[in-house]
Amino acid sequence: MVEHRVLVSRREIADITARLAKDITAAYANKHITVLVLLEGAKYFAADLLAQIEVPCDVEFTKVSSYLGTMSSGTVTLNADADLRARLRGKDVLVIDDIYDSGRTLRHCLNWLRDSQPKSVKTCVLLEKTIPHDAPVAIDFLGRTVPDVFVIGYGMDYNGQYRHWPYIAELADEPIGN
Ligand code: IMP
Ligand code: MG
């Protein structure tokens, strides 16, 4: 049995989502926001966060992928339906993602969003890896930083596994011979 070291406990996740929800509620006082959740990774985080946000919001989802195993493939694909652009036009959009690693995913989404002509765009991510980002982007609401390791749990996967874990851990190396 491989032991994966816990990096962010359930308790800490609850504290982080409560704080971010408070900050987002304050930043968008008297506004109606349109949240764009980047799938698959951000859906657990977004569900907990949005349950605590006290401003009216529409929730949109779009699937974005760039990772193969533990390596960023470098090419980002965003599967948005044709109507999504229209629903974002003129709106105060808050993009929610699980983790800011190279930044390519967020950069790609922000570029895509710009063409949809939203009224404003802000970003919220649960984790930021403490590395020089290939594609730096501004993060408006940040949960916390993590070291440069591959993390799993709470929406984040390794080849489709571990997403359902209620906490975040560091992916352990497989023992040789197993
Ligand atoms: P970036 O484009 O390199 O910033 O990577 C962002 C996306 O890759 C995130 O939205 C995650 O879905 C995924 N990702 C990056 N680092 C990790 C990790 O350590 N564990 C799981 N997924 C990750
Ligand atoms: Mg993601």
Image: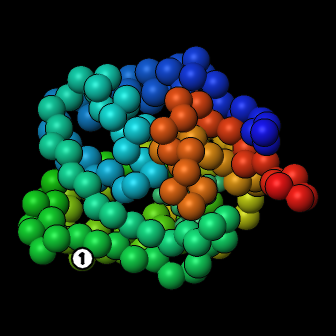
Of residue 68 and residue 61, the one placed in the foreground of this image is 68
Q: Is residue 44 above or below residue 98?
A: above
Please state the horizontal and vertical placement of residue 172, each as a whole percent of the image.
79, 48
Mark 1 lies on residue: 115
Q: Given the image, on which type of amino acid does mark 1 rest?
A: Asp
| Quadrant of the rendered image containing residue 119 | bottom left
Q: Residue furthest front?
A: 177
* Dot 1 alpha-carbon crowd within 10 angstroms: few under 14, some 14 to 19, many 20 or more: few
Of residue 58 and residue 89, the one placed in the foreground of this image is 58
Q: Residue at x 15, y 43 (%)?
A: 58
Q: Is residue 55 left or right of residue 152?
A: left
Q: Residue at x 40, y 38 (%)?
A: 44
Q: Is residue 173 left or right of residue 141?
A: right
Q: Is residue 119 left or right of residue 16?
A: left
* Quadrant into which the C terminus falls: bottom right
Please state the horizontal and vertical placement of residue 31, each as a whole percent of the image.
17, 36
Please state the horizontal and vertical placement of residue 69, each as a whole percent of the image.
63, 67
Q: Is residue 69 above or below residue 148?
A: below
- Residue 99 visible in image: no
- Residue 74 visible in image: yes
Q: Is residue 61 above or below residue 20?
A: below
